[in-house]
Amino acid sequence: MELIIGNKNYSSWSLRGWLMLAAFDIKFKETRLQLDTESFYSALKHVDCADKVPVLVDGDITVWDSLAICEYVSETYLDGRGWPQDRAARAEARAIAAEMHSGFFGVRNEMPMNCRAKRRIEASEAAMKDVARIDDIWSSCRERFADKGPWLFGEFSIADVMYAPVVSRFETYGVAVSEASHAYMQSVLNHPKMQEWIEAGKQETEIVEADEAGVDV
């Protein structure tokens, strides 16, 4: 099984696909492509996908889009354990994962993932509205599931995978959140596989100017 990803420093969607496999100890071959280069698009021409990363190639099956990859991995390799086992919790986890997948454009556009940076930006009202909503999601989940473990629904799940890049962004730009959400962020940042990804991103030297937002602090 092969996972094609972009730069670890910048590619938030790639992190989701990679973390889904790595955190659940599923063996795979990693192929990293440099974003926004001719070689990136040339390499993807040989794969039946949308010319975006991540892309999972498992035998004769190709899956693109990070949430689809998470669903495929959960169904094929984890017997559904990628989601909470409780039906109500599973429904909520799917809802907040989908909300992340399709929304929060203020945070996405103004706070690009940049693992190796510490930056300050002037966030718009739209971005701060996104921050408030994300903070509410995290703190609400942690309040209700704290007795089951340190993750959004107690045990690590696809919901945590989907929000991991947001944790990285909030860390980069020094976003203030509630005490419960801050504790959750530390759980994500301290995950061994998350630390492995961040360290690899810091070692990269390529620069994607569009993702170098803000000023150094």
Image (spheres, rainbow, N blue to C red):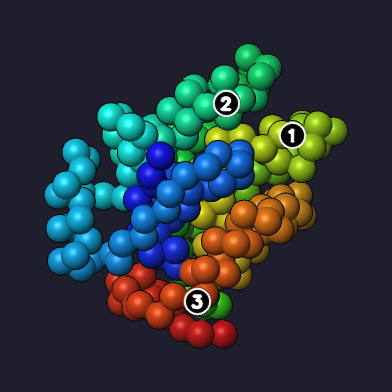
Q: Which residue is mark 1?
A: 154
Q: Which residue is at the front of the view, 125 or 37?
A: 37
Residue 40 seen anywhere in this rendered image of the structure = yes
Q: Residue at x 52, y 68 (%)?
A: 200
Circles 3 and 1: CB atoms closer than 8 Å: no
Disc number lying in front (2 or 1): 2
SS for callout 3: helix
Counting from the top left corner in percent of width and height, residue 34 is at: 30, 66
Image quadrant in which you'd find residue 40: bottom left
- Hey, what amino acid is under mark 2? Leu
Residue that numbered label 3 is attached to: 203
Q: Is 210 rendered above or below residue 182?
A: below
Left or right: 176 as drawn, with respect to 122? right
Q: Position of residue 190 (x, y in %)?
A: 71, 58
How would you rate the neighbour count of disc 2 (Cα within 10 Å): few for under 14, some for 14-19, many for 20 or more? some
Q: Is residue 181 left or right of residue 206?
A: right
Mark 3 to mark 2: distance in Å?
Answer: 32 Å
Q: Report helix, strand or loop for mark 1.
A: loop
Q: Quadrant of the C terminus?
A: bottom right
Amino acid, disc 1: Gly
Disc on the earlier residue, 3 or 1:
1
Quadrant of the rendering where the N terminus is positioned: top left
Q: Is residue 120 above or below residue 111?
A: below
Q: Which residue carries the number 2 mark?
A: 78
Q: Are marks 3 and 2 in contact (CB under 8 Å)?
A: no
* Residue closest to the eye, 109 or 147: 147
Q: Are marks 2 and 1 in contact (CB under 8 Å)?
A: no
Mark 2 secondary-structure assignment: loop
